[in-house]
Image: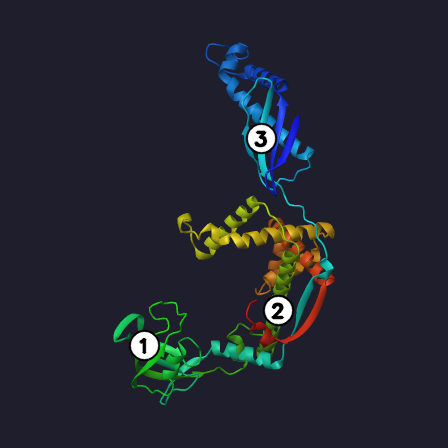
Amino acid sequence: MEVTVESTGTLERRMRVELPLAPIEQQVDSRLKSVGRTAKIKGFRPGKVPAKVVRQRYGKQVREEVLNEVLQQSYSAAVTQEKLNPASGPTIETEADNGKTFAFTATFEIMPEVELKDLEKIKIKKPEVTISDEDVDAMLMNLRKQKATWEEVDRHSADGDRVVIDFVGKLKGEAFPGGEGKNYPVVLGAGQMLPDFEKGLLGVKAGDETTFKVRFPKQYHADELAGKKADFTINVHRVEAEILPELNDEFAKAFSVVDGGIERFTKDVRENMDREAEQKIKGDLREQVMNALLESHPLDIPQALKHQEMQSLQREAMRRMGVENAEQAPPLDDFAAAAEKRVALGLLLRQVIVDKELTVDKAMIRVHVEELCAGYENAEDMANMYMSNPQVMQQIEPIVVEQQAIEWIIENGKTKEKKISFKEYMNAPAS
């Protein structure tokens, strides 16, 4: 077997393989003899069909089968011989039969060589989040607002009230799409309407009719309204005050906490806040590590892997959107940048795992599974069920070992802790 390899791109390789034809023809002859022993052809007894007839009937098919097998075997042998690591299946072109040799050309991309360096120099900022009693009180207030009721009041509206109105908006005297509503509830101060609109509803009473101007933002989603001023006429049906439930055992029962009452509920709230913060910290650290890896280790990635990842991301998007018709799928090119990042990170983290000889940590798998099940009442039973399911473990183990690689970098890199309050941290905009 003669093999030659040439580079036709950064990662693309063109490999030509040439084999003597005689041994292949011997395989064809041997296969035809085997076929002749069992072939059933009209006019001949089984096992008595002349070789010439067998070749006429099955020769082309058998030869194609043998050539296909030889091609696959020789391709694999050539790749191993040349120490190549294909990133995907090859494109094969066979050459014309010259009567002496069988030759083909395989074109494919190889995996890039990943050489990690200076992982210990990666800088990480680790948030140290503190949850104060005030943070817990604020969370309890949010939960009370979720269970709030509204009671009609006979007074002028104030911040925090709900005003139920009819409204009609006009631009230069003409109504516009979306500018009209009936029995529409507006909570003042909640930011559900434009600032000028909510300001116009402060100090109104049931039965009032008023008109005021509202300026739309320059970046408003409706181009015909962006930066314009419209006149809104309002009819007030009623003003309602928010009635918050008391913080007591009955309130706890509304959130399915029966045993332990409000004390247990408050403890659960703090624990949930702690879990939320820990999850956000883990995500932030992961993002920092991944960005640092990409910045310090730029990679050429196989386009075949990028295309596969683009298709995977497109399918994920279709599932989220509830789209089944491929014609309605988001454009594939929309996922190019995210796919390139995912593939590069996968290659880099895989190399960390290899270089640092990381093996999957069973204890970390258990922690990961328990985090997945934390929100369920029968969390422990679900965790045990997942742990005993080989298919689930097959999906979780790669995630966990990648997390181990990230944690290795965090532990061995230049990590600096920064204290921050729960409120400030959880309300911080995504970076």
Q: Amino acid at mark 3?
A: Thr
Crowding at dot 1, Cα within 10 Å, few <14 / some 14-19 / many 20+, comes out as many
Q: Position of residue 28 (x, y in %)?
A: 58, 18
Q: Amino acid at mark 1?
A: Ala
Q: Is residue 61 above or below residue 78?
A: above
- Cα separation, mark 2 vs mark 3, equals 56 Å
The residue pinned by badge 2 equals: 275
The residue pinned by badge 3 equals: 105
Q: Is residue 223 left or right of residue 377?
A: left
- Cα separation, mark 2 vs mark 1, equals 46 Å
Q: State which quarter of the image contains the N terminus.
A: top right
| Disc number placed over residue 207 in the picture, else none | none
Count of marks overlaid on the render: 3
Could you say which quadrant of the image residue 72 lies in?
Answer: top right
Q: Position of residue 226 (x, y in %)?
A: 37, 71
Q: Secondary structure at mark 1?
A: strand
Observer able to see residue 406: yes
